[in-house]
Amino acid sequence: MDIQEYFSLVFSDYTLRTITLGTAILGAVTGMLGSFAVLRKQSLLGDAISHAALPGIAIAFLITGSKDTNTLLIGALISGLIGTFWIRGIVTKTHLKSDTALGLILSLFFGFGMLLLTFIQKQPNANQAGLDKYLFGQAATLVEKDVWLMAIITGLCLFVLLFFWKEFKLFLFDADYAKTLGFNTNFIDILITSFIVLAIVLGLQTVGVVLMSAMLLAPAAAARQWTNSLSKMVFLAAIFGAFSGVFGTAISASQNNLSTGPVIVIVASVFVVISFIFSPSRGLLFRQIRFIANRRDLEQQKTLAFMYHIAETHDNISHPHTIKILNNFQGYTRKTLQKLVDKGYVTLDGTMWSLTEKGFETAANLYNQQALKDE
Amino acid sequence: MSEIKIQEKTPVSERKMAVQVDDLTVAYNYKPVLWDIDLEIPEGVLMAIVGPNGAGKSTLIKAILGILKPIAGSVTIYGKPYDEQRKLVAYVPQKGSVDWDFPTTALDVVMMGTYGSLGWIKRPGLKEKKSSLEALEKVGMLAFKNRQISQLSGGQQQRIFLARALVQDASIYFMDEPFQGVDATTEIAIINILKELRKAGKTVIVVHHDLQTVPEYFDWVTFLNVKKIATGPVKDIFNDDNLTKTYGINYKVSIQE
Amino acid sequence: MNNAQIEIQLIASLVAIACAIPGTFLVLRKMAMISDAISHSILPGLVVGFFITQDLNSPLLILLAALTGVITVVLVERIQKTGLVKEDTAIGLVFPALFSIGVILIAKNANDIHLDVDAVLLGELAFAPFDRIFISGIDVGPKSLWIIGIILSITIGLLFAFFKELKISTFDAGLAASLGFSPALIHYGLMTVASVTTVGAFDAVGAILVVALMIAPAASAYLLTTDLKKMLGLAVIFGVFSAISGYWLAHWLDASIAGSITTMLGLLFLVIYLFAPSKGLIAVMYREKQQRTEVSLLTFLLHLKNHTETRERHVNHLQEHINWQKVRAKTVLDLALKNNMILIDKNIVSLTQKGDEFTSKAIDYIITNEDAQIEDMKDDFFLFRG
C-alpha cells in the first residue's frame, strides 16, 4: 500500500479510519497539553514519565494476566504518577538537581520495566507477546474502543481547559501573582500535571514509551514560533500534533516493518524545523534577512552621515566633492552610493558627488534622532 | 475625593493601620530570613523598605501576601487576615520573576489584574477590558497594548506590571524593586504614579535599592536586616545612625546630594 | 562459575567503571539529561557507521557514532542559542528525532543489519563472550572486553591528567577561565568522553543502561559525600556492585542482564535515598523536624529579647500572638526550659543570661550571613536538641 492508496482508503476502510482517527486525536491532545509542559519548562518531565510508565504495564500484566489495553494503561498511569512524585521528592528533599532526578527515574524505571518484560517473555503462558509494542508503539493495534477512550479523555481535557483557561494562563505566566489573587495554585498545578501524565499514558500504545516525549514537545515548540497568543499556540499545537499523527500513521502503514512512533516523531520534527526556519516573526530565515537589511540600511546611513559632515562645511550644501574622499570611509561601497543616488539623496557627475536638498535634510534628521537617542 | 483629602491631612498617628505585622518569623530551609518582625504601616504612606542584599526585603512582602508561609507571627490588613482582605491588596512582583517570552500581549497581562475580583472560571468582559486599557493609558503604554511582551524594553515591562496592579484598584500596593533595570523616564513616570496613588489615600510599599532617592521619593521608610531596625517618617529616621545599623559599620550616605 | 560468566561480569564491571567516571561530572555539572540525549542520538551514527564498516565493533564505527553524540550536544546548544525554545526543550526535540531516524534506518535495512531495536535498548551482554578476538590464532578474549578496556584506560588516563582542570571547571567555571583553562575545551572533552563511552558500552548493555550507569551511581554517591574524589570512588564501587549483583539477579530470574543491573542500581539508589546518613530522606525529615523546633525556639527567644513589656512575655502569648498551635508552643517552651534558656515566673517568661547570650550570638551570625555557625553554636549551648 502506498500513501495515495492509504488516503483513498481512509474514509472507506474501517480499520484505517479507526487508526487515523486515533492518532489524530492523540496528536491533538498531546499538542495541547504539551504547550503547557513547554511553557512550564517541564519539557523533559514527559520523557521521564513515559519511561516510568513501562514497569506499570508489565506489572499490570503480571497481576491480571490480561492484555486488555485499559488494564495495562491503568498500570502505566500508576507507575507514571509514582515516577512523577518521586522526581518531586528527590528534588525537594535532597540536594540532587532536577536533571539528575529526571535521568534517574527515567533510566531506573525503564530498566526495571525491561527486566519485567524479559521475565514475562520467558514465562510459559505464551499469552505475553505484544507487550513490546509499548516500546515504539503500533498504531495498527488500535481498536475502536481505544479511540473512544482517547476521544472521551480528550473531550474531558478540552472541557477542563476551556473551563479553567483564565486560571491556567495566569498560573503559567506568574504563579506567585496568581496566589496573591486568591487562586489555589496547588490545585491548578496538580490538574495540569495529571492531564499531562494522562495524555502520555494514552499515547503509549501508539507512539511508545521511548519517543512519547517528542509528541508532547514538538508540536508545541513548532506552534510557539507562529503566534504570540497562548490560545492560538495551543490551537496550532493541536493541529500540528493531529497532522503529525495522521501523516506518521499514513507513512508507517504504507511501509513494511515500520513502527508508528518513530515516523510520527520524524513528521513532528519536520514541522519544528520548518517553523524554526520559516516563521515570519521569529524564524531564523527572516531574522537573517532582517539582519542583513538592517546592516545595509546602517551602511547607507553611515555613508550619508559622512557626506553630510563634509557638505556641512560648505555654504552651498550641493557643492560637488570628489568620490575619492569617500574611499577613506569604511562603510562606503559603490553599491551604497548607487542606492543613495536611487533614493535621490545624492547626484553624481563624473567622479564628483553632491548632496541634494532632500539628502541633506534626511542626513540632518538622522543626526538629530541619533543625538536624541543618546540622551 | 474630598474625604480622602482630609485624610491626607490627618496626622499619621491618628490614621488607621493599613498593614500590621506581629512577631513575624520566616525561614527558608529552616534558616531564619526574617526574625520577629513587628511592623505597623499607617494608611496613606509611600514607604520604602531598604536593607542590604539578603536582608529579607522581598521575603517580607511575600510573607505579608501569603506567598510564603511564616513559621511564626501574624499579618493583618486593616485589622483582618489577608485572606479576607485580598481585594484591598495589589502586588507588583520583581520583573525577573516571570518568563517574558510567554506568548501573550501587554493588554493580556494587564487584564490578569482583573482575575482576582472575577474569581474562578468567570471570564473578563468589556468592563475589565475598559479598565485595563485605562490602566495602560495611565502608565503611558496604550500604544503598545497589542505588543508581545518580549518585544518591550525593561522599563516598558515594568510599566505593564504596574498597570496590572493599578487595574486591581486596591487600597494597598506592594512593589518589589519596581525601579530595577528601568530607564530614567520610566523611573520618573512610575514615581509620579506612586505619588498620585498616595494622594488618593492609597498605601504604597516599595522594596527599594537606591538609598540616594529615598528622601526624594518616599515619606516613610523601614530599615530591615533580618530584624526590623527602624520604621517611621523619612524625615525623622532616615539618618546615618540607622543606615549604619542596617548596612554595617560606618555606612554613610550623603542625603543632601 | 564458568568462563563466560566471569567474562560477562568483567565486561559489565568495566562498563560500570567507564560510565561512572564521566557520569560523576555530568551529575555535578547538572547535565545528567545530556547523557540520555547522547545515548539515544548515537543510534543513527551507529547505523551509518555500520553501513560503512560492516562491523559493529570496528573502531571507526565507534568514532563515527561518538561523533554523532558530540554533534547532538552542539545541535542542542545551537538551538538553545537561537532563543526560539527554552533550554530543556532543545534537548527534548533533538534526541527523539535522531533516535527515530536510527530506528527507521534499522527497520528499512533490517536484512542487512544485525541490529535490532531491542538490542539497541538493552544490549546483548549475554552474547558478548561469543564474539572473540583472535591474534594469530590465539584467543585473547571477547571483543567487547577489549573495546571497553581500551576506552576505560583512556578515560582513566584523561582523568588523572586533567583532574585539577576538571575539578575547577566543574565547581567554578569562572575561576577556571581566569586561570587559563578553557571551560569550552573541558566541556567538549567531557562530552567526547561521554559519547565514546556510551558507544563502547552501548553494544554490550544498550542505550538505557548506559544512562542508568552514568547517573545512578554518581547520584547515589552524591548523597553520601560531596568530596569529588570520594564521590568518584563510591560511584565506581556502586557501579561494579550493581553490575555483578545484577548479573546474578538476571541469572536467577532468567531475564535481561541490562534490566537486572538497572534494577539493582535502582534498589541501591532507593536504599541510599532513604537511609543516607545526612542527606537521605529519613535523615532530612528528622532534621527538618528538629530544625523546625529549634528555629521556633530561636524565634521565641528573640521575641523575649525584643520585648520587655510583660504582656508580650506572658506564657499564653506564645500561643495566641505568635500564632502557634498548643502542642508546638509547649514543645518549644519545654525545650527552652530544659536548656536553661528561660525562666518562668508567675507565667511571665524571661531569658536567662545563657539564653540572652545565645540569642545575641545567633542573630549576629544570621545578619552576617554566617548561619552555618549557628549549628556549631547549638552544640555549645544545647543540653538537649529539638
Image: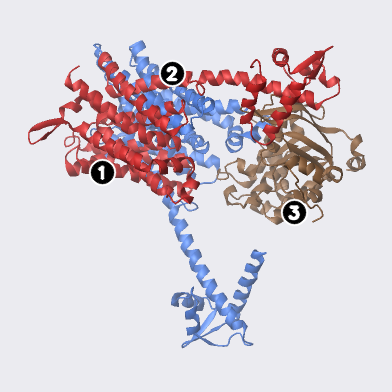
Chain colours: A blue, B brown, C red
Which disc, if any, is residue C63? 1
Mark 2 and mark 1, same subunit? yes
Residue beneath disc 2: C271
Q: In front here: C252 or A24? A: C252
The quadrant of the picture occupied by the C terminus of chain B is bottom right
Give the distance between the C-alpha atoms of the residues marked 3 and 1, in whole angstroms: 61 Å
Q: Secondary structure at mark 3?
A: helix
Badge 3 amino acid: Ile
Q: Chain of mark 3?
A: B
Asked if B50 appears above or below A294 in the picture, the reply is above
The quarter of the picture where residue C4 lies is top left
The quadrant of the picture occupied by the N terminus of chain B is top right
Mark 3 or mark 1, which is nearer to you? 1
* Whole-percent x, y for residue A275 in the image: 43, 48
Badge 2 amino acid: Val
Give the distance between the C-alpha atoms of the residues marked 2 and 3, in whole angstroms: 59 Å
Is residue C16 shown left or right of residue A366? left
Dot placed on the residue nearer the N-terminal end, 2 or 1: 1
Characterize the local packing of mark 3: few (<14), some (14-19) or many (20 or more) Cα atoms within 10 angstroms. some
* Whole-percent x, y for residue C160 in the image: 35, 39
Mark 2 and mark 3, same subunit? no
Mark 2 or mark 3, which is nearer to you? 2
Q: Is residue C98 in view?
A: no
**Outermost residue to the left:** C137
Q: In front here: A205 or B123? A: A205
* Whole-percent x, y for residue C362 in the image: 69, 28
Asked if A16 appears above or below B205 in the picture, the reply is above
Residue beneath disc 3: B188
Q: In front here: B247 or A222? A: B247
Give the distance between the C-alpha atoms of the residues marked 2 and 1, in whole angstroms: 37 Å
Characterize the local packing of mark 1: few (<14), some (14-19) or many (20 or more) Cα atoms within 10 angstroms. some
